[in-house]
Structure formats: C-alpha cells, structure tokens
Amino acid sequence: MPETDMLLMTLVIFLPSVFALGLLLFPKGTEEWMRWFALLGSAATLVVSLFMLVDYYNLLNSDTSNPARISMHGDQATLDYRVAEAGKRDGQMTPPVFQDYVSRKPWIEKFNIEYFLGLDGISLPLIVLTTALSFLAIIASWRIERYTKGYLMLFLLLETGMVGTFLALDFFLFYIFWEVMLLPMYFLIGVWGGPRREYAAIKFFLYTLLGSVFILIALLGFYFTDIQDFVDHSVYRKQVEAAMDPRTATPEAAEGKVTVHTFDMIALKKVGAAAFRKLSGRVDDVEVNVPIWKNNQVTGGQTMKVKDLPPAKKKQVLDRLEQSFFKEPFQLTMFLLLFIGFAIKVPLFPFHTWLPDAHVEAPTPISMILAGVLLKMGGYGIIRIAYPICPWAAQYLAWWLALFGIINIVYGAFAAMAQTDFKRLVAYSSISHMGYVILGLAAWKVVDGNTVGSQYWGWGVNGAMFQMIAHGISSAGMFFLVGVIYDRAHHRNLDNFRGLMEPMPFYGGVSAIIFFAALGLPGLCGFVGEFMVVLATWNFDKTFAILAALTVVITAAYILWTLQRVYFGTNPAYKDYQDMTVREILCIAPLVVLAIALGVFPKYLLMSWMEPSVTGLVDSLASLAGKG
Amino acid sequence: MFSQQAIDKLETSLIADLMAFSPELLVCTGIVVMLLLRLLPRLRLHMCGISLFFSGSALLLTAIHFWDVKIPLGGSSVALDFLGIVNPKDPPFSGLLVVDHFTGYLRIVLLGFAVLITWLSMLTGIPDEEDSADFYTLLLGGTLGMMLMASANHLLMVFIAVEMASLPSYALAGFMKGRRQSSEASLKYVVYGGGASGVMLYGISLLAGRFGTGYLPDVATGIHAECLKGGPGIAGIGGMDAVVLLGIVFILVGLAFKLSAVPFHFWCPDVFEGAAAEVGAFLSVASKAAAMALTARLLLVLAGTADLGEASFLMTTKIKPEELTELMQKAIGPVVAFFAAITATFGNLAAYPQTNLKRLLAYSTIAHAGYMLMGLAVMNADGAKAVLFYLFAYIFMNLGAFAVVAFLRNKTGSEDLKDFRGLVYRSPLLVVLLGVFLLSLLGLPPLVGFAAKFQVFSVLFDAGQHHAHAGNSTLSYVYYGLLIIGGINTVISTVYYLKVLKVMVLERPLEELEGRPAVPLRLSIGAVIFSLLLGLSIFVGGILWNPIAEASDRGAQDFRRAAKSSLPTQPPVGMGAGGGGGARPGGPPPGGPRPGGGPPFRAAPSEARP
C-alpha cells in the first residue's frame, strides 16, 4: 500500500512548483495559455488540499473498527498523539499506517534532519485558505500584462513555500520553506508593484530576513540540546547503533556516548514541557522516556516520571536537565527570538512598518496573498513553535504579549482611521485585526503556578485561529475590492471617491458585505473570532478585554466612514463606470460566500474539525501548570 | 647511529612517499609537458586539453584515495591503496608534508576547481592559442603550490608553498598584457605580496630559531609549554617571550594577506578589478581555499586538537589534552574571532557602494573569508569541518558569479553594474543563474550557501554552549557574540547582493527607456551548459547536502582526538617523540643538540640532511 498521506502532502506542496517549471515550455506570445495553465496548477493544488480536508474530516469521525484508520477524538486529534503512535508502530516493527497524516523520511542524516510532514486542525485550515486564495489570486492576476510568465512562475513558487511552511514538522524544513517564500515575494512586489515598489520590496525583504535570522538562532539553540530522555526508544536505538559497537553496547557504556539532537518539533515540544515543569519547581514530575535494554540492545522503552527512576538513572537524567535549555535565560531568550521573528510577519506593533509599504505597492493579487496568507505565517509559527517549545516563557511573558496585542489592535485601528489611501487603510486594519490573534494566544492566565480557566484560554486560541481564517478571507476580499476600483479610477485617494454605489450597485453590495465582515458584524466571519478572543481576555485581564471590545467601535467608525466616503452620494465623474466583470465576480464570490457561511455556521464549517486539535494543544500546555 | 637508521628509512620510504605525492606529481607532469610542447614551433595547440587532462586525472586519483574506493575486479574487489594509506602519524618526506584526509579533501577542492576554471577559460577564450601554454602553466603551478599549502607540515614547507602559490598568481593577475589596469593590479599584488611574504619568512625564522625545529607539531609543543607558563586564558600569551609571539603574529600576517582578511585586504579589490574575471575567480576561490586550509592546520595544530605524534609534552606533564586545547582556545580563539568579525563586517559594508561587479565580488570575497574565519575561531575539528563544507560550497557559488561576469564582459565589454540595467529582459537565463549564485552567497535556503553558513553558525553556537557549560563564560560570550555578528552580517549583505539583482531585474533596460527594443544577449551553448551545471550543483548541494557533510567530516576526522581509541603508550619504532621543545618547558636552546632520542628526520631538514 502506498504511503498515501506522504504522497498527498508532498503533492500539495510541490504541485505548484511542477506547474511553474511547466510554464518554462510556453513560448512567447502564448500569455493567455500560460494563465490558464497556472490556473490549472493552482486549481489542482486546491483540489488536493480539499481532498486532504475531506480525508482528515473522515478520520476525525471514523469508527475505530477500521484498522487502517485511527480515531481522532479529543486528545487524539493532536499531532503529539499521532506522532507517538507512529513512533510506537515503528518501534514494534508493525506496519505503519498510511493515512494518519504524519509522515517522515530521513533527509540529512548527518544533522538528523528529516523530511517530516504532518497536518492537524491547526495547519489544515490555513493550508486550505492558502490554496484557495492562491487560486483566486491567479484569477485576479489576469490583468497582469508585463512579463506574465515570470509573474506566474514566481507566484507558483511562492505557493509552494507557503503550503510547505504549514506542513513541515521538522524545524529545519520549516525554516527552508519559510525562506523560500522570501524571494518570490521580493520580485513580485519589486517588478510588478506600484511607484515605490523597489523601496517596499527591499524593506519587506530586510525585515523578514532579520526575523529569519532570529529564528535561525533559536533553531540552533534547540538543536544543540541533548534530548535523549524525550525521544522514542526507536530513535534512541538508532543512535546507539550508530555510535557504538553492538557487542559492547550496554546501558552504562551508552551513557555519555550517545546523544540525540533533533529538529523534530513534536519531540522538542516534550522537551519544552519538561523545561516548564523544571522551572516551576516540579522537576520530579518531568516525564522521561527510559530505554529498556535486553542483551545489549534497546528493545523497548517506557515513560516514567523522574521521581520514579532508579537512583543511578535519576542522577544522569537530572544532570541532563541542567543543560541550558532547561534554564530561565535560555527559555526567555529563545522564546523572544522566535516571537520577534514571527511577530515581524504578523506584524506586531514596533515591527509593522514594512506592511503598509508592501501592501500599498504590491499588485492587487499579491496584496491578497500577503494579507491573506503571509501574515498568518507569523501567527502559525507562534502557535506551532514558540508556544509548544517554550511554554514556560510564554506564560511568563503572557501579560506583555497581551499588551502588545492590545497596542496592535488600538494602534492599527486609529492609524487606519487617519489614512487617505484606500489600500493603506486596509493595510492598517490588517494590523489591527492581527492584534486579536496575538491577544487570543496570550490569554494564558497562570496564577501561583496554576492555570486559571484553561477553557477560556482554549477559547482564546480557537478564537485566534478563527480570526486568522476570517481575516484571511475578509482582508483578501478588501484588497481585491480596492484593486477593482483602482483599475477603473487609477487612484486610491479616499477623499476623491464618491457615489460608486450608483454606477456599480453590485460592487457596492459586495463591498458592504466584505467590509462588514472585517468590522466584525455578528453573522459574518469577523465576529466569531473577535468575540471568542474578547471573552478569553476577560478571564485574563479585564482592562484588556474592555479595550479590545471598545476598539470595535473605532473599527466600525473607520469602516463606516470609508463606506460613506467611497460609495454614498453621487459623483458625475464616475457615472459611466462599468460594474464588476464576470471574472471579478468569479473571484470575489467565493470570498463573499465564505464570509457569510463562516459567520452563520462557524461550528460546522470550521470549528468542528479545527477545535479538537487546538483544544488538545491548549490542554497539553495548560495542564503543565496544573489546572486551578 | 640513528642517522643511519634515518637514512635507511628515507630510502625505504621513498617510493611510498612519492606515491602519496602522486597527485602533485601528475600536476607537475602537466606543467612540464606544456612547457615542452611550447618549444615545438610548428605546433599551434590550445593547451586547455592538457591542463584538463592532468588536473582531471589528478582529481580522480585523489578522490579514489580519499574515499578508499575499491575496484571490483573479477569477483574480488581490489583496494587502490598503492597511494599509501592515509596516516597522519607517518607523514611522507620525513614529515615535511602530511597527507591526511584534510589534505585529501583540499586536493579534491583545488583540483576540482582547476578543472572547472580550465573549462571556463575554454568557454571565455581568455588565453588565446598563443598564450595558452603560459596561462595554464601558471594556473597549474599555482594549483600545485596551493596543494602544498594544504599539506605543509613544516614551517619551511609553509613558506615554499605560499610562495609557489603566490608567484603564479602575480603573473596571472597581469595576464591581460594590453590593459594598463591589469599591469597595475599585478604590480600592486607583487608589492603587497612580497611584503607579506617577507614578514612571514621573518616570523618563520624566529619560530624555527627559537625552537630549533620547523616541524609544526614540535613547534606547537614548544608554544604550549610557553603558554602554560603564562597562566590560563589570554594570560597564556603573556607567557610567551617576545620572539615566539612575534613569530606567531608575523606568520599570521602572511596568512591574513593570502586570506585578504582585514586589515591586510587592500590589495584584493584593486587586483580583482584589474585582473580578468577568470583570474579573479582563481584568486578568490582556490587561493582562498588553500590559505584557509593552511590557517586551519596551523590553528588546529596549535590548539593541540590534532594528534601531535605522541608529542612528548603531553607525556611528561600532567595536563590532559582536552585542557591543553581549552587553554589554547582561550588564548587564541578570541583573537581569531575578532579578526573574523571585522573582516566579515568590513567586507559587507564596503561592498555596498560598489558599482563594478568584480570589485563588488572582491569585497564579498573578503566578507566570506570572515565567515570562514568564524568557523576556524572555535579551533576544533567541528570548526574545520564546517569550513571544509564552506569551501566546497564556495567553489560553485563564487566561480559561478565570476563566470557570469566573464560571460557578460565578453558579450557587452563592460563590467559595470549600470550597463546591466534590465538585463533580465535581454538574457533571463543568465540573470536567473547569477541570482542563484548571489543568493547562495547570501545564504538563502535551499541553496548550498545556506547549508554552509548554517554549519558555521551551528559550530559557533555549539562552541558557545560548550564553553558556557565548562565555565569559560568569556569564551562563550565571544562565540555567541560572533554568531550574532554573523547573523547581522547576513542581513547587511542582503543589500548589496540584492542591489545587483535589483538593477538587473527591477529596473527597465536602457533601450526600453530610449524606445528601442531590448537586444537579447545570445550565449554560446557551452556557456549555457557550464553555468546551468554550476547552478544545478548549487540547488542539489543545497537540498541533498548529506554526502558533502559526510565528506567534510571525513576531511576533518584527523583533527578529532576522540576518534582515536587511545593514545598508544609506546611510540611506534622509527616514529618516536619528535618534539624536543616541549619536553623541557623552558624551551631548548636554539639549534642545540637534540636529546631524547627523537629521530632527526622529523626535525629541521638542515639538521636531518647535513
């Protein structure tokens, strides 16, 4: 039986690249065919991702009687569980299951780097969002006339980077995909952008590269920790076989000779949990994997708490727990490095200045991708890497993170209000909305070493995830709508528009829906996430909750004011504007439908398959501190 | 009595020594053949084939040697060990040279580069038929010197090798005889180079005089003794007397010149600008690789990480090898780190305003010397391993960048950035490939330059963590600081690498602004294949770099003490402790008789061969 999950995940990552290479074969003058071909490529990718979605959804609900499938209810929906199961099967030499959507192949053995892919309810919505927005953005790119081939190739390469980032479970692999996105974006802004495109492109590049360097340093920091106590015995056995002569291998001899270093995010999460326990003074509760030796071979392993270990082993383990990874400065430094690296992408307040420039100068489809997907990378990185690997620092700094989230929300909203450029306004509204993501994540309240109200924090993280998806839909829609009017009026000055509703009633109606979705009107997608985040924040810090809720008024103010300035009234200059074309309607319609549908059926459409994984992650982190 | 023994040994081991030297001998043969062919007046032959043949076959031989390739012959496999077993404990030519895995790796790098650069020169036609003998003789001669630099194990050999590598380089820099700039570059190079070698020779004479030997492990042993007297850390330097200190500093100055490390880099941009791009590539890759190798060997021998041939010093004192290494790291590591940091930072900052492509690449070369020095600053086998990987990556990316510059020069007659505005619309392939080379130099994944930089950075982090654990907080701050400087440098370097791409891709071509259609550049098919091959290697090397990492690990394994099971208590016959210097921590009287039964054939040749 083929490894269907590996195949599908690899396909969804590299299909766009294959189509990008295929574009090379088109001769000059066949631009129309190139567009169709690229559209086909992104459509195929979308179909594969939807297939994965259906398959994953079935996994969640399947009964356990089918041996090829595993049930994924509750805790089992987390990646930790599936990876541990896969590891067990590997250790017992039982055949692997090819439909559990975690899959690994050795890649660079010298550094123990793996081609390790996996998806869960956290990454899958973002993958589908990416493939869907890419498809729509290619439709929106039909008007790109200059150097079409280069544009489409870069776009498809960008898609590979984006999807790969969401699927990678090996930190090194993640980093590579993360960096792969950088260059296509630089050129897409720099060649096809507006008048100040060169400035915007290099600014984007430098900011993001600086963030990447931070992430790289954290990556090295994790790698150089010996984590042999936290890996599955099968991994440990491989290291023993590599480092020692099988005849002389004994537990005593292996001690000090065998070390395990990894980029595996799932394994690192366990190490992060151990660091949390140790730093909160409960080193006895740290769970370690103890290999079982038989006839000079590692034959199995068992999970034990440190306090239950035999004295000799306990001493060794405690020695290893003295590595710098398990110390406060390291955890704080690494968390901050990761957080800043990801926050630049989000973008968070002091690091946000690249975003308005990049958005304003980028061509419409690229703005859609930037706002719809690239900003989510930051949030995803924080959920997937920064929080699980450095949970202690995350809760230690929770108040500060929440503060920066609030600053983002308030600052973005006020800044948006001050803008006269339509695109800049949307860009600042993005900053404001992404603040909710940070706020929701940060709402981990720990008092006296106990998590207070872990279910509220669960709402916060779920809300943050929902907000990312909702914002992906609404902001992409807003940028597209700005693009539609820019194509006709060739300016974006808010003060010079008026009365667009009259010649373009359909456009006006669609705009109203999308803008209200961004505003957070109940019944539309923007409401759900913000509501959950504010609820979670109430538990965390009431002042923050009130501030976040009050900002909705400012958001409403600038959005309504914008609608008023652009659509209402009459303006003879724009009388003969054509309403949206079929292509434009095709592009915006799915976004409108999703914006409404996610607002009306948040549970059926998204929460039901996203929530188990998110809650599983939250529970595993919150339980570290002990539930209060 | 023992001199008779030594002479016997010399005689019996001559064949084995020559076998170990066979790649160099092949290159020598190539040079001689070319020079002889040149004498035939009627024969008008482009010599590139000969250069290619000899460097290629030497490369093949070295590769077989390095990987212990076994050839299947009629059912049984035959090991090609006629080249001599790689054994650093029994160095050929009485210890003047050492042929270990490190040497092997460097030989592969240098010969591989010689093959590639010969191929490139065929494509660009830089030596015409008439000059080809000169050009390739110089090229192979330089390569030969560099191979010796990689295997030198004696201060005398160090000097000879450096000179052998330098003299052909001076001539190559001035090879384009018609151009004023070229001659100027050559002259500048000679003057600077001459000064640097003079200083280096002085340093060598000081050290050799002080310790009565030029054999590197013995010299290192002597220095260790001095360092121990001074006390721990930087204070160890205070323990050395002025002669030793000056000797070390002067030798390092000579090497810094070859490395174009700040503050001895002034020649580099001028020479690169004046010389042909092909020569620039040769100087920036091969010459850099050899100098880096020599520096690595000196530093590692000094750090005592290499097995010093049962150096008597370790036998007679209580100090453990690990402690000794740490001591030397404390004393010398920060100094190397400092120069690595300023070299990288200066190179990157100075590259920013450049508009001439070759000049820009020259500063980029300086910056990369800085990155590689960072790997050496940790002074252990892991650092050497990272640098070996870096050198491999560096061949492809830097040669690629220079090759594109050479192709562009041939097509447009210009090397100035402003003439390449909007080049992507005239020659998309060339610009995409140049992009790959430059971005690999920048260190963007998934290109091989990233893998290289990643390893250097990881070595720095590892060293920082290791020393923090061992309680050497100063040293750990040094390495962490170096890591941060490296990271910042990567960001700085983005600006100028991207500037090139910005001009070529983002700006409109001049013709378009003037309303004419852009004239496409047509490359020869050979040039397309050559640059595509390099570009592909960079991709493949960046994605599947495990084999290269294995090879570089193998290359550095002889510097890894832990790999040896234990130090043999009894030195093998004929191999006894060579070091007179370390046995008596006070240091031996210069030139005095050598007590202690060390066979003299490992001492200074003047002693061994009266």
Image: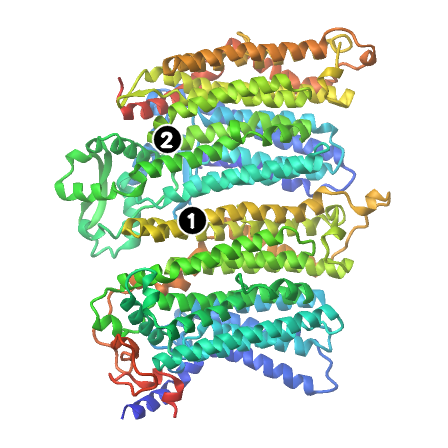
Callout 2: residue from which chain?
A: A
- Residue A346 visible in the current orientation: no
Mark 1: few, some, or many residues within 10 Å (few <14, many ≥20)? some
Instruction: Locate residue B157, reporting x and y percent.
Output: 45, 79
Quadrant including the C terminus of chain A: top left
Residue A388 is tagged as 2
Q: Position of residue B36 (x, y in %)?
A: 64, 86
- Compared to A192, does B545 lie above or below? below
Q: Are marks 1 and 2 on the same chain?
A: no
Q: Nearer the viewer, mark 1 or mark 2?
A: 1
Relative depth, front residue between B141 and A448? A448
Q: Chain of mark 1?
A: B
- Mark 2: secondary structure: helix
Please name whichever residue, B116 or A96, is drawn nearer the observer in this view of the structure: B116
Which residue lies under the disc numbered 1?
B481
Q: Position of residue A71 (x, y in %)?
A: 35, 23
Q: Is residue B238 left or right of residue B128?
A: left
Residue A267 lies, with reference to residue B434, above or below; the image says above
Residue A134 found in image quarter: top right
Q: Amino acid at mark 2?
A: Pro
Residue A446 lies, with reference to residue A535, above or below; the image says: below
Cα gap from disc 1 to disc 2, whole angstroms: 27 Å
Q: List x then y, in percent, for residue A535.
A: 42, 12
Q: How is the structure coloured here?
A: rainbow
Q: Quadrant of the N terminus of chain A?
A: top left
**How packed is label 2: few (under 14 Cα within 10 Å), some, or many (20 or more)?**
many
